[in-house]
Image (cartoon, helix red, strand yellow):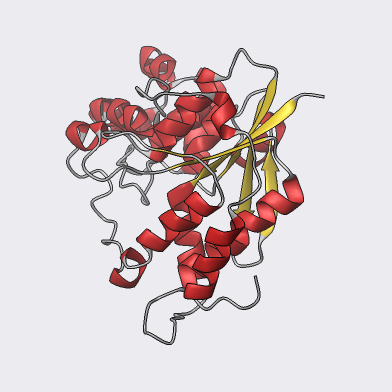
């Protein structure tokens, strides 16, 4: 049986932890709820899934190559809440105490780090599980790569293989960037083509396969939709570039460094005591 490498989308998990419960703080007034829930989530993952290898992908501070392509990329997102920013040093201490490597690269997002790590182990006898709530990462699903998503406040776990991606989106994993190129993504402020929603995007891709082939055969698209697509061709192609995960991030990678190890219990207990967590 192949060993399993679990790769956690760090910021996706962090924000989910932050919004999972109301504000909590220590008796000293230090915000603590994101650290508490993130600790619970990661420990639950380790205990229940027992991965052979585990790593966390993180968004490096600063602009990315997507910001250079499109100034308005993610412009609609609010700044990180101050009480969450205060917890970041404790989150870093949590990762260190769990002895889980964190991978980040200036100029790239965690998505790109994940895509690159998947590419780096493509020739290994490994099953890769990406733990994220980000639909963009479904494009990485393949026979040896799946996505584990935890949905909403219910905590429902959805395991995406290629069949599950097709069931949910109506396209193959590799077509996810093409879907987003047409319908856009309000979360990341990817513009897409005005007036083209998910159903129309999926229908077009069922007929043409890719955005490139769609534009090569635009004469086959009827009426007003053809005019709209023609008028926003550059925007559609830009949107696909924004939605495509890079697999060429310049990072060092040593698989053995990701092997799951016993936590540094003294450091972990010290962190939990400092944060006044009594039920972990």
Q: Is residue 151 visible?
A: no
Whether residue 197 sits left or right of residue 255 in the image: it is left
Say if 13 sits above or below 82 in the image: above
Q: Can residue 79 be seen from the camera position used here? A: yes
Pinpoint residue 146: horizontal percent, then vertical percent: 65, 33
Please report the residue visible at 53 percent of the width from the left and 59 percent of the height from the top: 267
Q: Residue at the spot x=47%, y=67% of the render?
A: 34
User: Where is residue 195, by image quadrant?
Assistant: top left
Image quadrant occupied by the C terminus: bottom right
Front residue of 276 and 72: 276
130 horizontally vs 233: left or right: right
Residue at (41, 22) in percent of width and height:
211
Q: Is residue 228 above or below residue 74?
A: above
- Residue nearer the viewer, 247 or 5: 5
Say left or right for 173 vs 18. Answer: right
Identity of the residue furthest to the right in this view: 1
The residue lying at 57 percent from left, 33 percent from top is 258
Outermost residue on the front side: it is 266
Residue 107 horizontal/vertical position (percent): 26, 33
Q: Quadrant of residue 28?
A: bottom left
What percent of the width, then of the height, locates residue 198?
49, 42
Residue 247 vs residue 106, the one in the foreground: 106
Q: What is the x, y in percent for residue 141? A: 60, 29
């Amino acid at each position: 049986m192949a060993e399993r490498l679990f790769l956690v989308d760090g910021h996706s998990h962090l924000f989910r932890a932050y919004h999972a419960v109301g504000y909590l703080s220590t008796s000293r007034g230090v915000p603590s709820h994101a650290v508490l829930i993130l600790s619970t989530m990661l420990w639950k993952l380790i205990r229940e899934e027992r991965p052979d290898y585990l790593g966390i992908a993180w968004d490096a501070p600063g602009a990315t190559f997507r910001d250079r392509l499109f100034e308005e990329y993610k412009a609609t997102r609010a700044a990180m809440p101050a009480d969450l920013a205060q917890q970041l040093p404790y989150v870093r201490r949590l990762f260190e105490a769990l002895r889980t490597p964190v991978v980040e690269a200036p100029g790239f997002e965690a998505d790109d780090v994940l895509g690159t790590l998947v590419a780096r182990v493509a020739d290994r006898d490994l099953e890769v599980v990406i733990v994220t709530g980000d639909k963009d990462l479904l494009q990485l699903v393949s026979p040896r790569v799946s996505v584990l998503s935890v949905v909403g406040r219910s905590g429902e776990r959805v395991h995406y293989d290629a069949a599950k991606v097709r069931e949910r989106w109506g396209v193959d994993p590799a077509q996810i960037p093409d879907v987003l190129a047409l319908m856009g993504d309000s979360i990341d402020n990817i513009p897409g083509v005005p007036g083209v929603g998910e159903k129309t995007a999926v229908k077009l891709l069922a007929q043409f396969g890719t955005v490139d082939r769609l534009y090569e055969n635009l004469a086959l698209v009827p009426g007003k939709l053809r005019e709209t697509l023609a008028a926003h061709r550059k925007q559609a192609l830009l949107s696909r570039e924004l939605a495509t995960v890079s697999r060429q991030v310049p990072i060092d990678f040593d698989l053995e460094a990701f092997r799951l190890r016993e936590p540094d219990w003294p450091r972990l207990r010290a962190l939990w005591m400092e944060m006044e967590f009594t039920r972990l």
